[in-house]
Amino acid sequence: MNAREGEHYNLILNEEEDEHWSVRILEGTFAETIIKFHRIAVNEEKGALSFNFHVISSPNVHAHIDNEELQKYAGWILHDIIESCIDEGSAKFTDRETGKEVSVDEVFSDGTSG
């Protein structure tokens, strides 16, 4: 599945935190569920994305971080967000060891970004 902003989810600004965004899921099993991503990392060796998130609110009692269906959906959304940020040039990546900003090409050393 490919998630698309405006169709499958919307980005919303957290009211308590001026610069942090959350995601409102618009359709499906988790419609109207609001999640917030934390600690997003690229595992260079495995070529995989890892992330944490928490559920801010949901009308679905099964919407929790241990729900595998919600984890997959969150992954699709995060992939779309990162891909859009890379395309727009607004993506920022930081090396965990040095704390320095690194380029997209350094993060995705095999030349792929999506």
Image: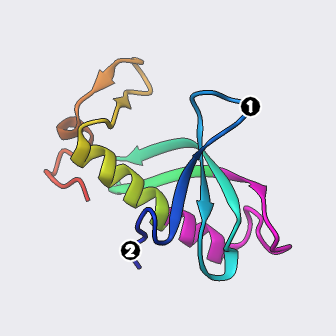
Q: Residue at x 32, y 45 (%)?
A: 85
Q: Nearer the viewer, residue 18 or 113?
A: 18
Q: Is residue 63 magenta?
A: yes
Q: Nearer the viewer, mark 1 or mark 2?
A: 1
Give residue 78's position: percent from left, percent from top.
Answer: 47, 56
Give residue 81's position: percent from left, percent from top.
Answer: 41, 53
Q: In the figure, is residue 93 to the left or right of 12?
A: left
Q: In the figure, is residue 39 to the left or right of 110?
A: right
The disc label shown at residue 16, or none:
1
Q: Which residue is situated farthest in the right direction here? A: 61
Q: Inspect the image, locate mark 2, and give the three-letter code of the amino acid beneath it.
A: Asn
To which residue does mark 2 refer? 2
User: Which quadrant of the figure has residue 103?
Assistant: top left
Q: Is residue 107 magenta?
A: no
Q: Residue at x 59, y 70 (%)?
A: 26
In the image, residue 64 sits, relative to residue 2, either above or below, namely: above
Q: Do the numbered discs 1 and 2 sit on residues whose CB atoms are within 8 Å?
A: no
Q: Quadrant of the N terminus?
A: bottom left
Q: Residue at x 39, y 48 (%)?
A: 43
